[in-house]
């Protein structure tokens, strides 16, 4: 009698496990289908349009455009610039990422006060302009592989600091970035978590 | 136990009483305030001039995802094969106001429209074709929402 | 006046497929700001479209339509070179019109 009951219990558990696996598979597929449906006419295109207009428009106290801004590949070169940032810039003697380089250009070329941007409200005014510019500049490097320069000692230091920060555990949950983003195939609820330790990435979410 | 139909009918009756007491004047402008501010599906359709209960029809199509990762942006397409349709309308049953959009079916366009809507929570979504004589025919689908899109 | 819309109009099988992305907050009136007050509703109420100079499309929206609304519809007839113009009017009375050429 007991063996029979055990077998029955096992069979039921087996069925439950299978149905749970079924449900999980179709839900992830459903989310993929949802994301597909949003590809065409993605609202990011509006930011790209705005960013392009801001790059070319004469603005600020110096009434100049950003077309002479050096994003690391020479003045005005935008295509491919995003996948080489952050990098070292001699004129500021710093390693800068895209947003901070845009602020440098807006201040030196256009005369816009950096404090106005840095202290501004998120999503408003000049801060929103930086977001739009960054979206457009990044879009000009679509489908390109990240290829950061490491020729300058400051670039190498920045890389090593970033690596240590990525794997450093801390905070209330004793998590590091790597806790969620250090392995393939991880998920939180219905969001697939990209593995950010490889280049090229696994193609999940933001992992190019 | 009271059926959902009974609850809907009762709340519709109560809402109709309130709506009747404070109906705003109709604007010359097309915007139908009463329909868009109605709470449930029944009242929204009434505000759009529908008489009688809506009837399910395979000639009305609602294209929607099974699950929406972000309830603030849920893509929908409505279409119909029926003749003499005046409007194609979209409603989300559990939203604070059920009526989302009203598309005029004019002879110059295909009766096929797509847009994106906010959904507060998992809910039935309806595509309703309203005919010239005020009848409503619908298709519906349950869309699961993992993160509600109404804020708060 | 708002920010420009992105309009794509494609001639396809004797019709024109129109896809529009509009720039608008579409505030539902349900959200609360940091001090707990409801942010007032503000949304596009009416959208119309013309093919050359004839109105062909019209719809009304409630505040539940998503922010930066996407809209797709098909105009019967029409060909490459025709002009499609899309106009919206919002709950504050603000309006915007943008045009595109059918490709």
Image (tube, rainbow, N blue to C red):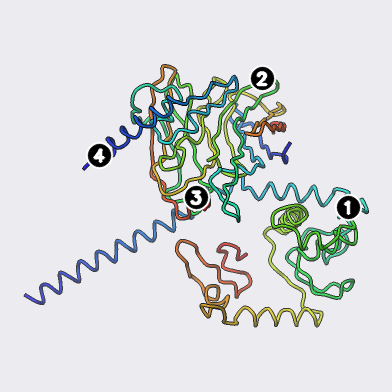
Which labelled disc corresponds to residue C54?
2
- C99 relative to B33 in the view: left or right: right
Gap between marks 2 and 3 measured at Cα: 36 Å
Near-viewer residue (B111 or C28)? C28
Mark 3 highlights which residue?
Answer: B71
Q: Position of residue A176 (x, y in %)?
A: 56, 78
Could you classify mark 3 by the number of other residues whose Cα lies within 10 Å: few (under 14), some (14-19), or many (20 or more)? many
Q: Residue at x 68, y 66 (%)?
A: A145
Q: Secondary structure at mark 1?
A: loop
Give me the chain letter of mark 4. B
Near-viewer residue (B110 or B3)? B3
Could you classify mark 4 by the number of other residues whose Cα lies within 10 Å: few (under 14), some (14-19), or many (20 or more)? few
Q: Position of residue A124 (x, y in %)?
A: 72, 52
Which labelled disc corresponds to residue A60?
1
Q: Position of residue B150 (x, y in %)?
A: 51, 48
Give me the chain letter of mark 3. B
Q: Residue at x 49, y 50 (%)?
A: B71
């Amino acid at each position: 009698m007991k063996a029979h009951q055990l077998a029955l219990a096992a069979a039921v558990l087996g069925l439950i496990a299978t149905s749970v696996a079924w449900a999980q598979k179709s839900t992830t597929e459903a989310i993929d289908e949802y994301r597909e449906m949003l590809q065409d006419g993605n609202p990011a295109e509006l930011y790209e349009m705005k960013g392009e207009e801001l790059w070319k428009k004469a603005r600020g106290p110096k009434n100049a455009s950003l077309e002479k801004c050096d994003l690391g590949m020479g003045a005005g070169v935008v295509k491919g610039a995003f996948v080489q940032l952050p990098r070292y810039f001699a004129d500021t003697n710093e390693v800068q990422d895209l947003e901070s380089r845009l602020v440098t250009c807006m201040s030196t070329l256009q005369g816009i006060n950096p404090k106005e941007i840095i202290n501004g409200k998120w999503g408003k005014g000049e801060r929103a302009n930086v977001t739009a510019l960054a979206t457009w500049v990044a879009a000009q490097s679509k489908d390109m592989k990240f290829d950061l320069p490491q020729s300058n000692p400051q670039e190498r230091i920045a890389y090593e600091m970033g690596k240590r920060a990525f794997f450093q555990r801390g905070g209330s949950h004793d998590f590091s970035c790597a806790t969620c983003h250090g392995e393939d195939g991880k998920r939180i609820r219905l969001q697939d978590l990209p593995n950010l330790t490889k280049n090229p990435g696994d193609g999940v979410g933001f992992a190019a | 136990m009271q059926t959902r139909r009974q609850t809907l009918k009762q709340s519709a009756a109560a809402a109709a009483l309130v709506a009747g007491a404070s109906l705003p004047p109709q604007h010359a402008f097309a915007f139908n305030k009463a329909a868009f501010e109605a709470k449930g599906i029944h009242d929204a359709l009434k505000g759009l001039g529908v008489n009688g209960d809506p009837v399910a029809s395979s000639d009305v199509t609602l294209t929607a995802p099974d699950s929406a990762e972000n309830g603030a942006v849920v893509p929908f397409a409505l279409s119909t094969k029926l003749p003499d349709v005046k409007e194609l309308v979209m409603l989300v049953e559990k939203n604070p106001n059920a009526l989302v959009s009203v598309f005029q079916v004019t002879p110059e366009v295909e009766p096929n429209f797509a847009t994106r809507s906010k959904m507060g929570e998992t809910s039935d979504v309806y595509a309703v074709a309203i005919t010239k004589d005020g009848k409503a025919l619908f298709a519906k689908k349950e869309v699961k929402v993992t993160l509600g899109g109404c804020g708060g | 006046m708002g920010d420009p819309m992105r309009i794509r109009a494609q001639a396809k099988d004797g019709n024109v497929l129109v896809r529009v992305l509009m720039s608008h907050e579409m505030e539902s009136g349900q959200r609360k700001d940091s001090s707990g007050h409801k942010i007032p509703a503000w949304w596009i109420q009416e959208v119309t479209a013309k093919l050359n100079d004839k109105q062909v499309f019209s719809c009304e929206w409630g505040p539940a339509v998503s922010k930066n609304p996407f809209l797709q519809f098909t105009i019967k007839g029409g060909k490459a070179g025709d002009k499609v113009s899309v106009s919206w009017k919002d709950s504050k009375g603000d309006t915007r019109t943008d045009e595109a050429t059918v490709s």
